[in-house]
């Protein structure tokens, strides 16, 4: 499992524990919901910035 996949798995677990949709999390974080989806699937890696 890659680092991006591991991060995505934890992100999804935390989001679901908070009962947030990807859209709600994206709004709160100032990110687009499709970016959240890409992160959760390990297709993108988050940046430090």
Image (tube, helix red, strand yellow):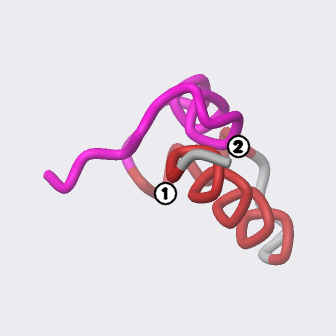
Q: Nearer the viewer, residue 47 or 20?
A: 47
Residue drawn at (51%, 52%) of the image: 3
In this view, the residue in front, 47 or 33, is 47
Q: Residues within 10 Å of mark 2 (few under 14, many from 20)?
A: many
* Mark 2 or 1, nearer chain start: 2
Of 48 and 32, nearer the camera is 48
Q: Main secondary structure of the magenta part?
A: loop
33 left or right of 9? left
Depicted 17 relative to depicted 23: above or below: below
Can you identify the residue that label 1 sits on? 28
Considering only vertical position in the picture, is 27 above or below 43? below
Residue drawn at 70 percent across, 43 percent down: 22
Tell me the residue that label 2 is attached to.
22
- Discs 2/1, front: 2
Q: Which range of residues does the magenta coloring cover?
A: 30-49
Q: Position of residue 13 (x, y in %)?
A: 80, 67
Residue 23 % position (x, y): 67, 39
Q: Judge by depth and name the residue closer to the eye, 18 or 7.
A: 7
Give the residue at x 61% y 36%.
Answer: 42
- Give percent across and percent down for residue 32: 48, 29
In the displayed structure, does residue 43 sit left or right of residue 9? left
Secondary element under disc 2, as helix, strand or loop, is helix
Judged from this view, the residue extending furthest toward the front is 1
Residue at 59% over, 23% down: 34
User: Is 7 positioned to the left or the right of 45 in the image?
Assistant: right
Is-magenta flag for residue 46?
A: yes
Marking on residue 17 = none
State the separation of the CA atoms marked 2 and 1.
10 Å
| Residue 36 lies in the magenta-colored region | yes
């Amino acid at each position: 499992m890659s680092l991006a996949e591991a991060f995505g798995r934890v992100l999804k677990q935390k989001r679901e524990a908070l009962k947030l949709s990807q859209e709600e999390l994206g709004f709160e974080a100032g990110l687009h919901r499709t970016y959240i989806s890409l992160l959760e699937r390990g297709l993108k890696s988050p940046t430090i910035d």
